[in-house]
């Protein structure tokens, strides 16, 4: 069972990892100016891996899928601008485009910093909506998967907990509006028997705080 938490006050620390995962779920509602025509089913997904270079920039390996557009996709780009603002093209992706398109692009340090701070977006253009039909701010993604056991618990748990175990899997997606944590918790052989995990039965400790 999973849940999503929107962490409004999340720290804006930038990743120093050599490889950064990027993601954007595109929709017509995010596009500026608002698109015309029947775009109620228009949507898309952009995913990419940015590999840092020695110059401070990065190489991006990307994939773009979409459906429900008002017509053929004329082009797709990464633009530089905040949410709700139209900005200039920073990285051309494809044009014309087909769903499932993929490619590679090289960006400099300025663009990489803009991506990590939530200052870029991806959009897809059509003949009906030349300024863009679907759009989303580009966010960074991190995944963690710690293994839980009784030996790590403090204070030491009581009872027969030798075989108690669990796996916590979480994906944090950071954008300009904050961080969304999507998680899943599996566990077995607890002293209280098997139970169904809920969002109130598992907490994420911040900066070393314990519960």
Image (spheres, rainbow, N blue to C red):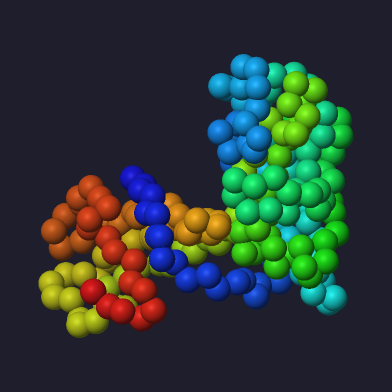
Q: Quadrant of residue 28?
A: top right
Q: Residue at x 73, y 49 (%)?
A: 87
The location of residue 183, given as percent across then percent down, is 40, 54
Is 71 left, or right, of 35 in this rendering?
Answer: right
Q: Confirm whether residue 183 shows in the render.
A: no
Is 156 left, or right, of 57 in this rendering?
Answer: left
The location of residue 67, given as percent across then percent down, is 66, 25
Is 154 left, or right, of 174 in this rendering?
Answer: left
Q: Residue at x 34, y 66 (%)?
A: 204
Quadrant placement of the C terminus: bottom left
Q: Is 179 located above or below residue 209 in the figure?
A: above
Quadrant placement of the N terminus: top left
Is 47 left, or right, of 159 in this rendering?
Answer: right
Instruction: From the viewer's side, name the closer residue of 144 and 65.
Output: 65
Q: Is 166 located above or below residue 29 in the figure?
A: below
The location of residue 43, given as percent across then percent down, is 61, 30
Instruction: From the viewer's side, name the closer residue of 173 and 74.
Output: 74
Q: Residue at x 50, y 56 (%)?
A: 177
Q: Residue at x 78, y 70 (%)?
A: 109
Task: Count every numbered label the image shows and give the total.
Answer: 0
The location of residue 191, given as percent across then percent down, is 15, 63
Q: Confirm whether residue 91 shows in the render.
A: yes
């Amino acid at each position: 069972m999973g849940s999503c938490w929107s962490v409004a006050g999340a720290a804006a620390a930038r990743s120093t990892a050599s490889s950064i995962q990027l993601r954007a779920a595109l929709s017509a509602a995010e596009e500026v100016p608002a698109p015309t025509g029947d775009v109620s089913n228009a949507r898309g997904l952009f995913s990419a891996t940015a590999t840092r270079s020695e110059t401070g920039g990065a190489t991006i390996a990307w994939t773009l899928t979409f459906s429900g557009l008002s017509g053929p996709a004329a082009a797709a780009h990464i633009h530089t601008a905040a949410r709700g603002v139209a900005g200039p093209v920073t990285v051309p992706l494809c044009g014309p485009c087909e769903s499932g398109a993929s490619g590679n692009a090289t960006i400099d340090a300025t663009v990489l910093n803009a991506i990590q701070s939530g200052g870029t977006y991806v959009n897809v253009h059509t003949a009906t909506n030349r300024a863009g039909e679907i759009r989303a701010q580009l966010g960074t993604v991190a995944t963690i998967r710690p293994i839980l056991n009784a030996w790590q618990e403090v204070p030491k748990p009581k009872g027969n907990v030798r075989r108690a175990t669990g796996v916590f899997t979480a994906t944090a997606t950071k954008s300009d509006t904050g961080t969304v944590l999507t998680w899943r918790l599996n566990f077995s052989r607890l002293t209280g028997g098997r139970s169904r995990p809920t969002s109130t039965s598992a907490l994420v400790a911040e900066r070393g705080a314990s519960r």
